[in-house]
Amino acid sequence: MAKIHRLMPQHPRMFRAEVARTERVSPSIHRVTVTGPELGAFEWQGYDHWFRLFLRLPHQRHLRLPEVVGSRWWQPYLDIPEEERPHCANYTVAGFRPEAAEMDIDFVIHRGPTGELEGGAAIWACRARPGDALALLDQGLLFDCPADASEVLVVADETGLPASTGILRSLPRHTVGRVIQEVPTAEDRRELDGPPGVAVTWIVREDGAAVPGSAALGELLRHRPADAAGYAFVVGESTLAAEGRRHLHRAGLPKDRIFFSGFWKHEAHQAA
């Protein structure tokens, strides 16, 4: 496991919940709203607050969860027999309403070469029904902008859209900077609430065969940081994250002012 980020909780809490409702919010995004008495105590911090999502396997009647002791949960998770071990994936809070104990989770819909849904979590989300059980383990924030940052740059593909959205609405209103957000279709764009000094550049991929994140990376390679006192947050497909960090560092931004994370890795489908 990677080292613990400083904004992760030292004693993360597991929250049990259930599906309240679902909706397709755009061609590529399916939203599942979850609820439960425990969620009222979730200490939402805004920005890119994320969590580990635990789902029952298709053959299971009950959700079996690992014991969490301090920050330790991974080994207990692996100790669960494979046939009983819940599906686990990382997600960002898309919306949270503490007064209703409701959380929105946005799932990106990926499809294979013949149109079939891909990804265990996305398949679950599209089939989810009210009352379906799940659990989430609070993991805190990854966005860690220094107080003296002269500007903020956020770059993401569609898997980072909830993070981009959350960061924008949480930034102080005096913040200046830019968001480069790639989405598969024009209909996936949405109104984003952010500081007036932060410009949003939407990149619509359009080509269904293109590697996700490549268009955002192309735009990023044309971007130059204003100075070395900025802060960058680059997430999504692994090439976007790694090459984006490399470019920004070469352009003058110190490594400790660049957060990057490959949320997933694109694997080309082999022709039959």
Image: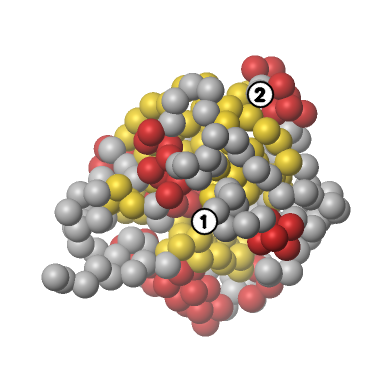
Name which of mark 1 and mark 2 comes first in the sequence.
2
Question: Residue 52, image x and y in percent?
Answer: 62, 49
Tell whether 6 sits left or right of 170. Answer: right
Residue 80 visible in this rendered orientation of the protein: yes
Question: Residue 125, image x and y in percent?
Answer: 43, 37
| Viewer-side residue, 169 vs 110 | 110
What residue is drawn where x is 39% and y is 27%? 23
| Viewer-side residue, 43 vs 2 | 2
Q: Tag 1's secondary structure? A: strand
Q: Tag 2's secondary structure? A: loop
Picture layout, residue 111 above or below residue 60? below
What residue is drawn where x is 69% and y is 17%? 99
Residue 251 visible in this rendered orientation of the protein: no
Tell whether 167 sits left or right of 272. Answer: right
Question: Residue 117, image x and y in percent?
Answer: 30, 47
The CA distance from mark 1 to mark 2 is 32 Å
What residue is drawn where x is 73% and y is 69%? 3
Q: Which residue is mark 1?
A: 154
Residue 36, label in figure: 2
Question: Which amino acid type is shown beneath numbered disc 1?
Answer: Val
